[in-house]
């Protein structure tokens, strides 16, 4: 693991805070629907939202509705489906549509293709599909081959590698684009971005935040563009609690 940074960013009243969900705010679970919300997380997010005058957002590969099920009272903005969805004040205001995409047909094709490998989990998404091989990492080549075929059959979607998974997501979406869209809106506009994430999908957003004069925080192991690192979601929670004390 790359050594921890000697210091972490200091949150100020001019910060815009962007947070990934899985592996960042919550520990990775064997299945996406099995994540456990840590005690105090909803309250922590609400306090951050108040302290930063609303400039706190979740940016996730999960869709907005799924995130709302886990954090129903989160008051901030949510960019879901890698930025294909954007919700403010609890309402989805922007959605990227693929005119030729039939999500149900895509989900059926993915499930049929891996039917002989029950260890592969098919995660159905409104704008794509993901195949998880965490239960049997030796099945990675099967997942990669299946997803390459599905990508060829669905040119409006692009392959997105992730931790023990491969995903098809809308072309043109990405967490860096979600960051840019939010930074063009109130209350994020004019602020310094700080982005925390754990996965390959977060690297472009951390790079973008740093290019704009902000900071990236990598959660967990692995190569990263981020200038800072924390070992796990519990460490991020402690840092956020300390940052809240400094914002008083």
Image (spheres, grey):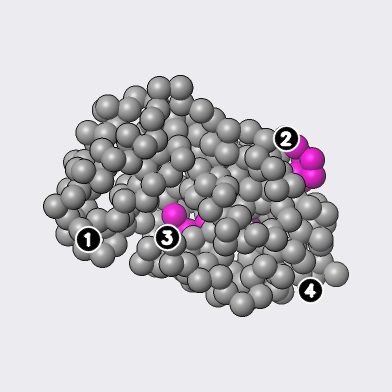
User: Does dot 1 land on a helix, a strand or a loop?
Assistant: loop
Residue in front for this viewpoint, 29 or 48: 29
Q: Which residues are magenta?
A: 184-199
Q: Is residue 195 visible?
A: no
Q: Residue at x 69, y 58 (%)?
A: 74
Give the residue number, with chain letter if any, for mark 3: 32
Instruction: Verify CB contact (< 8 Å) between mark 1 and mark 4.
Output: no
Instruction: Verify CB contact (< 8 Å) between mark 2 and mark 3.
Output: no
User: Does dot 2 land on a helix, a strand or a loop?
Assistant: loop
Instruction: Verify CB contact (< 8 Å) between mark 3 and mark 1.
Output: no
Q: Residue at x 46, y 22 (%)?
A: 99
User: What predominant SS class does the magenta segment belong to?
Assistant: loop
Q: Is residue 182 above or below residue 239?
A: above
CA distance separating discs 2 and 4? 28 Å
Q: Is residue 42 above or below residue 208?
A: below
Q: Which mark is residue 245?
A: 4
Local crowd at mark 1 within 10 Å, few (<14), some, or many (≥20)?
some
Q: Say which quadrant the N terminus sits in.
A: bottom left
Asked if residue 162 lies in the magenta stretch, the reply is: no
Q: Earlier in the sequence, mark 2 or mark 3?
A: 3
Could you tell whether 247 is left or right of 165 in the image? right
Give the residue number, with chain letter if any, for mark 1: 119
Q: Earlier in the sequence, mark 2 or mark 4?
A: 2
Q: Look at discs 2 and 3 and give the one toward the viewer.
A: 3
Q: Look at discs 4 and 3 and give the one toward the viewer.
A: 3
Q: Earlier in the sequence, mark 3 or mark 1?
A: 3
Local crowd at mark 3 within 10 Å, few (<14), some, or many (≥20)?
some
Q: Is residue 89 visible?
A: yes
């Amino acid at each position: 693991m790359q050594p921890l940074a000697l210091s972490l960013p200091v949150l100020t009243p001019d910060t815009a805070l962007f947070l990934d969900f899985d592996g960042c705010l919550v520990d990775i679970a064997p299945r996406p629907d099995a994540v456990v919300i840590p005690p105090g997380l909803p309250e922590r997010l609400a306090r951050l939202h108040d302290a930063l005058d609303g400039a706190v957002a979740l940016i996730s590969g999960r869709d907005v509705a799924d995130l709302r099920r886990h954090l129903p009272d989160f008051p901030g903005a949510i960019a879901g489906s890698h930025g294909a969805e954007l919700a403010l004040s609890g309402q989805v205001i922007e959605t990227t549509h693929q005119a030729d995409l039939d999500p149900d047909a895509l989900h059926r094709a993915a499930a049929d293709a891996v039917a002989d490998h029950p260890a592969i989990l098919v995660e159905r998404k409104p704008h794509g599909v993901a195949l998880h091989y965490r239960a049997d990492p030796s099945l990675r080549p099967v997942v990669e081959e299946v997803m390459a075929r599905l990508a060829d059959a669905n040119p409006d979607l692009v392959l997105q590698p992730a931790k023990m998974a491969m995903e098809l997501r809308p072309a043109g979406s990405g967490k860096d684009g979600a960051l840019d869209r939010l930074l063009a809106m109130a209350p994020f506009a004019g602020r310094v971005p700080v982005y925390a994430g754990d996965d390959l999908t977060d690297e472009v957003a951390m790079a973008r935040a740093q290019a704009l004069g902000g900071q990236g925080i990598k959660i967990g192991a692995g190569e990263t563009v981020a200038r800072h690192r924390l070992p796990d979601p519990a460490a991020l929670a402690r840092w956020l609690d300390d940052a809240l004390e400094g914002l008083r």
